Image (cartoon, rainbow, N blue to C red):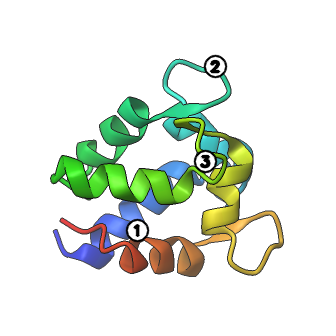
Amino acid sequence: MSTDELIRELFNKYDTNKDGSIDAAELLAEFDLNKDGKVSFDEFKTVLTKYKTCVDEAALKQKFDQFDKDGDGKLDAKELLSEFDVNKDSKVSFDEFKAVLVKYKLKN
């Protein structure tokens, strides 16, 4: 599977209402595996490694820490959305989603 195909597959999985964009609730729902309203590093790692987006744990932790703006060791919806929502319209388009994955070199 090419990187573009992998990114499209990930995007489509997160876009649960199939409106062509990902909102904070959709993004958090995918990463927050235990449904506590936050995304721990282990949850982040589980989701990304499931799609083979990153296999180096040290690099993955570094990327997680870049998303974790308040440094509490968990990502909330605001932190996830702020990283992916480049144009600040409270939605994440495919192009925004892909840009973040490319920026952090999350690829197969």
Q: Is residue 53 above or below residue 20?
A: above
Number of the front mark, 2 or 1: 2
Residue labelled with disc 3: 27
Secondary structure type for disc 2:
loop
Residue 45 horizontal side relative to residue 67, left or right: left
Q: Which mark is residue 8?
A: 1
Which structural element holds mark 3?
helix
User: What residue is at 48 percent from the left and 61 percent from the top?
Assistant: 11
Please name the amino acid that badge 2 sits on. Asp
Viewer-closest of 83 and 2: 83
**In whole angstroms, how far apart are the C-alphas of marks 3 and 2?**
14 Å
Quadrant where the N terminus sits is bottom left
- Give the side of residue 14 with respect to residue 19, left or right: left
Foreground of the two, 17 or 50: 50
Number of residues whose C-alpha sits closer than 10 Å to that of mark 1, classed few (under 14), some (14–19) or many (20 or more): some
Give me the residue at 46% from left, 76% from top. Answer: 98
Q: Quadrant of residue 28?
A: top right
> How far apart, in angstroms, are the residues tagged by discs 1 and 3?
15 Å
Few, some or many residues within 10 Å of mark 3 (<14, 14–19, 20+): many
Q: Mark 1: which secondary structure? A: helix
Specify the amino acid type for callout 1.
Arg
Give the amino acid type for the residue marked by disc 3 in the picture: Leu
Looking at the image, can residue 20 be seen? no
Q: Which mark is residue 36?
A: 2
Gap in angstroms between the C-alphas marked 2 and 1:
27 Å
- Where's residue 40, x and y in %? 48, 31
Q: Quadrant of the C terminus?
A: bottom left
Dividing the picture into quarters, in which one does residue 93 lie? bottom right
Residue 16: horizontal and vertical position, in percent? 61, 46
